[in-house]
Image (cartoon, rainbow, N blue to C red):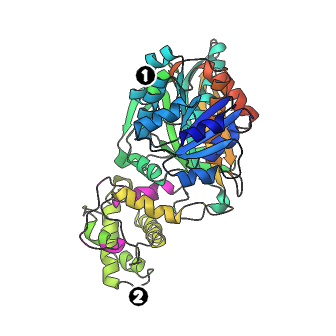
Amino acid sequence: MLSLYRNQLMGQQKKVLLIGSGLMAEAVIDQLLKRNDNFVVVASAHVEDARKVIQNKQRCSAHHLDVTETEELRKFVKNSDIVIAYIPPQFIVPIARICAEVGRSMITSQYTFPEIRALEEECKKKGIIILNEIGLDPGIDHLATVKVRDEVYAKGGKIIEYESWCGGVPSPEFCDNPFGYKFSWSPFAAIRNVNNDAKYLENGVQKYIPASELLYSTEIIHVNPSLQMEGYPNRDSLPYQELYGLKDCQKLVRGTLRYQGHCVLMAAMKALGFASEETIKVDREMSWFEYLLSNIRFESCSTNFLANHHITQLANTIDQKLFTLAQLETLLTKVFNRVFSQYYYKDKSEEQLYKDAEQITYTLKWMGVFDPKNLILNNVTHVHNFAAHLQTLMNYRQGETDLVAMQHIFKIVYPNDPRIYVKKSTMVKIGHRNGKSAMAITVGVPTAVATQLILDGVIKTTGVHMPNISEINTPLYEELKKEGIYCEEEDY
């Protein structure tokens, strides 16, 4: 196999190894193939996907690669000039170690793991760079932030507040499910993200939000006059004060954007256990309805909602050919006993509770919870089960497009000037109908452009990096602007 690989590369000047063949791969390949001196080898455990992604393309090939087979991986890396790793996080560190050992630069859109930072000295000795966090978020967010930071600092200013928001959602005309969301990347990773705690800075004080409260901790973000979304903090924002050099910041938060209404609905699903990391164990084939009926945990709930006739009203909206009214009432009683025990609902009126209950009931119907043919998966975690089921309902169909929204908000002060200036740096992208998604473009193109800049010797920095230094950011941002990928800036 590798001899064929070498023959195909004979006479080719740049040999790019792309490990992975997922949703972002084609955007990377097409960007790299704009240069006639590049040859792209796609190596994947799912070789049929790799063959599909290179179909009808010149100067590329597809090969099977199990990255857990260390010697085979080493051969692929040694026979390449540079490596792009588009693969789940658990495999990134072993690939990085081999790249450092063999002396090949590596680019990835994943966060920078401590185990990869530990390769700093070895990378410098070998004269290579491991460049992480080159995608959308993380990626373009770093570039846009560092650009503004450098311009403000060059004028002697200080950034006293900083917010960074980003999200990928369906274009409005294709937003046709209760969650207002479809999967343009890993369904499992997207849902599992709601299990993370969050930390950020507010008025100079560190704030902590436990995962149980995360989806109730939203704020409205006015992306532009026609797009208003809700955002919630994303993981730990605190390290970015040092990484960005924002020492004067009193507020610093990085967060996720969704259409309004998504978060409280997903929080309800989480309260019902759908996002749990516990493994499902059943001794027989079981429908979602049966499983929920026997597994939703009881919580004390002081609201009068359950004491009135609301449950019967809601149960009557469900097809009773499949289950009896009594069964439906029992399940809905357990559902709303559990959901409305959350602190978010403590001060809601009975009218507000009923409106939320209607939406949750409609969503459970839409998900097929009341269809006995929908069976749960055994011996997987609840979050895997939930993600696998939603993937059948919330994928993009042919001709549908997605939307990526990113916004940074800076509050800035300058010496001898009493005013506080606000700068917004915003990017909104819509995917191509019957073509690449906005998510694939905004993740894949930055990765490919960074790869090309390293190959061309424009980025000469060695070691382990993310794009938070000018030597990397400036040429990368300039090239991405030529591709139409950048943030528009407005001053207020």
Q: Quadrant of residue 173?
A: bottom right
**Type of amino acid under label 2:** Lys
Residue 265 painted magenta: yes
Quadrant including the C terminus: top right
Q: Is residue 62 left or right of residue 289?
A: right
Which element type, helix, strand or loop, lies under badge 2? loop
Mark 1 or mark 2: which comes first in sequence?
1
Q: Is residue 488 visible?
A: no
Q: Is residue 447 above or below residue 175?
A: above
The stretch of residues the image draws in magenta is 261-290
> In this view of the protein, which residue sits in the foreground, 54 or 490?
54
Q: Which residue is mark 2?
A: 321
Q: CA distance from mark 1 to mark 2?
A: 62 Å
Residue under the image location 54 percent in, 20 percent down = 128
Q: Is residue 313 left or right of residue 301?
A: right
Q: Is residue 436 left or right of residue 346?
A: right
| Dot 1 and dot 2 residues touching (CB under 8 Å) | no
Residue under the image location 64 percent in, 41 percent down = 28
User: Residue 136, image x and y in percent?
Assistant: 59, 39
> In this view of the protein, which residue sits in the foreground, 4 or 470?
4
Q: Is residue 47 above or below residue 291?
A: above
Mark carried by residue 119: 1
Quadrant including the N terminus: top right
